[in-house]
Image (spheres, rainbow, N blue to C red):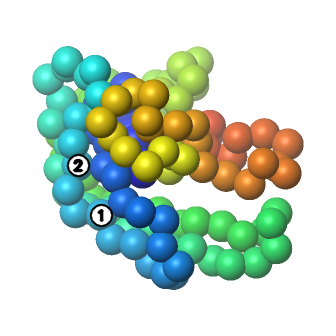
Amino acid sequence: MYALGAWAAIVFFPLVAADRVYVSTFNKYPGYSGNLTVAGSMTLVGTADTGRTAKQTLTWSLTGLDTACVANAANSVTNGCGIHVHTGTSCASANDVGGHYYNSSLASDPWLPVVYV
């Protein structure tokens, strides 16, 4: 599952044993009542390796994002203007979304500095 911005959009996709996942539809994050409507596409490419060197590469072409999200705008906002993968298996409720998806052996959350601007 993936989320971006001020929790404006979310999409669920099952974790699959594939090197590439293409995302073409986005839904509002559970409980989000703002006016942003995100559309476009995103591709996630997984690179297998050991637990600390495996990685995911994201590319995207999105519209409807928060226009306040410009370079350095979210430096002091946790997850602000962010784009990341979550552990959850459903987007039905905020509790189902889960935390950021990454190897727990890492010292810190690698998604925190990832932004879409």
Q: Label 1, on which residue?
A: 23
Q: Label 2, on which residue?
A: 26
List x then y, in percent, for residue 97.
Answer: 44, 37
What is the C-alpha distance between the residues marked 1 and 2? Answer: 8 Å
Callout 1, which amino acid? Val
Callout 2, which amino acid? Phe
Q: Residue at x 52, y 37 (%)?
A: 98
Residue 83 appearing in the image:
no
Q: Is residue 93 left or right of residue 63?
A: right
Q: Residue at x 21, y 42 (%)?
A: 27
- Quadrant in the picture for residue 113: top right
**Mark 1 touching mark 2, by CB under 8 A?**
yes
Residues 7 and 1: in front is: 1
Residue 62 appearing in the image:
yes
List x then y, in percent, for residue 115.
Answer: 49, 42
List x then y, in percent, for residue 64.
Answer: 18, 39
Q: Is residue 107 left or right of residue 18?
A: right
Q: Residue at x 85, y 42 (%)?
A: 107
Residues 13 and 108: in front is: 13
| Circle 1 residues within 10 Å: few <14, some 14–19, many ≥20 | some
On residue 111, which mark appears?
none
Q: Residue at x 23, y 49 (%)?
A: 26
* Screen quadrant of the C terminus: top left
Task: Note whether 80 is above or below 60 in the view shown.
Answer: above
Q: Is residue 24 left or right of residue 71?
A: left
